[in-house]
C-alpha cells in the first residue's frame, strides 16, 4: 500500500477526541520526564509540513513522533518517513495509527545516542532530498539540534517545534538580549525563519510555555570561514560566559586565567580586529567572532608554550 493509497478515510490523530481515545485504548499517559506534549491542532501540523516543502520523493526524519499526529501528515506528503521514538510504550499506538502507510519506518532509540550517518545510510540510501520535521522535547532541544547540525548530514532543512524563547534565541541578531552562543551556533550552519507561533493550549497536556515552529535552511557552506571551527566556538562560548562582562575580561578568564601578563596583548589584539575591548559579546557579529578567533588562536598557542 503506498503513501497516497489509503489514508483518505483514516480519522486524523490530531484532534483532542482521537488523541484521548488512543491514550485511553493503549493506557498511555504523557511522561513529563520525556517532555511529552501531544499536539492536537491540525493547522499547526500542516504549517510544519508546508514549511518542510516536501516532494513525493523526499525523505523525512522525525524525532519523537509521539502518537503519530505529525507522522501521518508527513507520510501523506513524502516518499520515506523515518520516525525515531525513545518511548517503547507508544509503539502499539504508532503501529495502529500508521498502519495505512507503507512508507513509514519506526525506529526505537535515543536520537542523542545514535550514529546518525549510519541511520541515514540504512534508511535514506538513494534518497537525494532529506529533511527533518519534528515536535522536539523541549528539555533536550539544543543537544538534538546541535547533533543534527554537527553530524554533516545531507539535509536540506530542519523544521521543528521548539519553545518560543529558544526559537527567538536561535534567530536573534547581534545587539539584543536573545543573541548568544546558540544564535551563532545555529546561524553558522543555517538560515533561520520563524514560521509560526503556537499557544500552549493546542497540546495534551498543555506545556508551561508557548512554542514556535522554526525552519532552519542548511547553508551550502558555513556563514563564515575560520581556521579552527572548534576554537571558533570556544571563543564564542567564552564571550558569553558572563554576559555582563566585557569581551576582554571574558577572554582573559577563559584563555589566560593563569597568565595575567597577557592582558595588554589581548586588548591590543581586539583593537587590531576593530573590536573595542570594552564591548560585550552580544554586540559582536559572527564575522567579528570569526576574525577574532583566527587572530586569537596563535596567541593562545603561544601562551601554552
Image: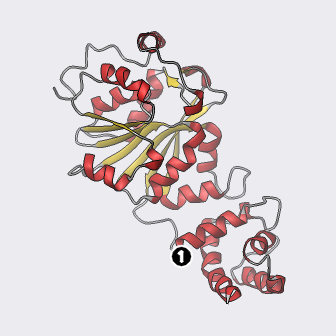
Where, quadrant-wise, is the N terminus in this rendering?
top left
Count residues near mark 1 (Cα–Cα under 10 Å), then give few for <14, some for 14-19, many for 20+: few
Q: Is residue 124 visible?
A: no
The image position of residue 2, as x and y in percent, is: 17, 29
Q: Is 113 situated left or right of 194 in this image?
A: left
Q: Is 106 situated left or right of 176 in this image?
A: left
Q: Residue at x 53, y 79 (%)?
A: 227
Q: Is 260 situated left or right of 178 in this image?
A: right
The image position of residue 168, as x and y in percent, is: 63, 44
Where, quadrant-wise, is the C terminus in this rendering?
bottom right
Corner quadrant of residue 81: top left
Corner quadrant of residue 266: bottom right
Residue at the far front in the pictured view: 88
Considering only vertical position in the picture, is 136 above or below 173? above
Q: Residue at x 48, y 48 (%)?
A: 112
The image position of residue 133, as x and y in percent, is: 41, 39
Q: Residue at x 78, y 75 (%)?
A: 252
Q: Nearer the viewer, residue 128 or 26?
A: 26
Residue hosting label 1: 228
Considering only vertical position in the picture, is 18 above or below 52? above
The image position of residue 185, as x and y in percent, is: 57, 59
Q: What is the secondary structure assignment of the residue under circle 1?
A: loop
Amino acid at each position: 500500500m503506498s503513501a497516497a493509497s489509503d489514508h483518505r478515510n483514516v480519522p486524523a490523530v490530531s484532534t483532542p477526541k482521537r488523541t484521548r481515545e488512543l491514550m485511553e485504548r493503549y493506557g498511555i499517559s504523557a511522561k513529563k520526564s520525556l517532555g511529552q506534549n501531544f499536539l492536537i491542532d491540525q493547522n499547526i501540523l500542516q504549517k510544519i509540513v508546508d514549511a518542510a516543502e516536501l516532494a513525493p520523493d523526499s525523505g523525512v526524519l522525525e524525532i519523537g513522533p509521539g502518537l503519530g499526529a505529525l507522522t501521518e501528515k508527513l507520510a501523506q506528503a513524502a516518499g520515506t518517513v523515518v520516525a525515531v521514538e525513545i518511548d517503547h510504550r507508544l509503539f502499539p499506538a504508532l503501529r495502529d495509527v500508521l498502519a495505512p502507510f507503507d512508507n513509514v519506518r519506526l525506529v526505537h532509540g535515543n536520537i542523542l545516542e545514535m550514529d546518525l550517518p549510519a541511520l541515514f545510510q540504512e534508511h535514506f540510501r538513494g534518497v537525494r532530498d532529506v529533511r527533518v520535521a519534528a515536535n522536539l522535547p523541549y528539555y533536550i532541544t539544543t543537544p538534538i539540534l546541535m547533533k543534527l547540525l554537527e553530524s554533516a548530514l545531507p539535509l536540506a532543512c530542519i523544521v521543528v517545534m521548539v519553545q518560543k524563547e529558544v526559537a527567538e534565541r536561535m534567530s536573534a541578531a547581534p545587539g539584543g538580549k536573545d543573541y548568544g552562543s546558540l544564535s551563532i551556533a545555529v546561524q553558522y550552519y543555517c538560515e533561520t525563519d520563524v514560521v509560526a507561533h503556537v499557544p500552549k493550549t493546542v497540546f495534551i497536556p498543555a506545556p508551561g510555555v508557548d512554542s514556535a515552529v522554526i525552519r532552519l535552511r542548511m547553508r551550502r557552506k558555513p556563514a563564515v570561514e575560520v581556521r579552527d571551527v572548534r576554537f571558533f566556538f570556544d571563543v564564542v562560548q567564552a564571550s558569553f560566559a558572563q554576559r555582563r562582562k566585557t569581551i576582554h575580561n571574558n577572554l582573559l578568564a577563559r584563555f589566560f586565567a593563569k597568565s595575567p601578563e597577557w592582558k595588554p596583548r589581548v586588548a591590543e589584539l581586539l583593537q587590531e580586529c576593530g573590536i573595542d575591548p570594552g564591548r560585550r559579546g552580544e554586540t559582536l557579529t559572527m564575522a567579528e567572532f570569526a576574525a577574532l578567533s583566527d587572530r586569537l588562536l596563535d596567541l593562545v598557542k603561544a601562551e601554552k608554550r
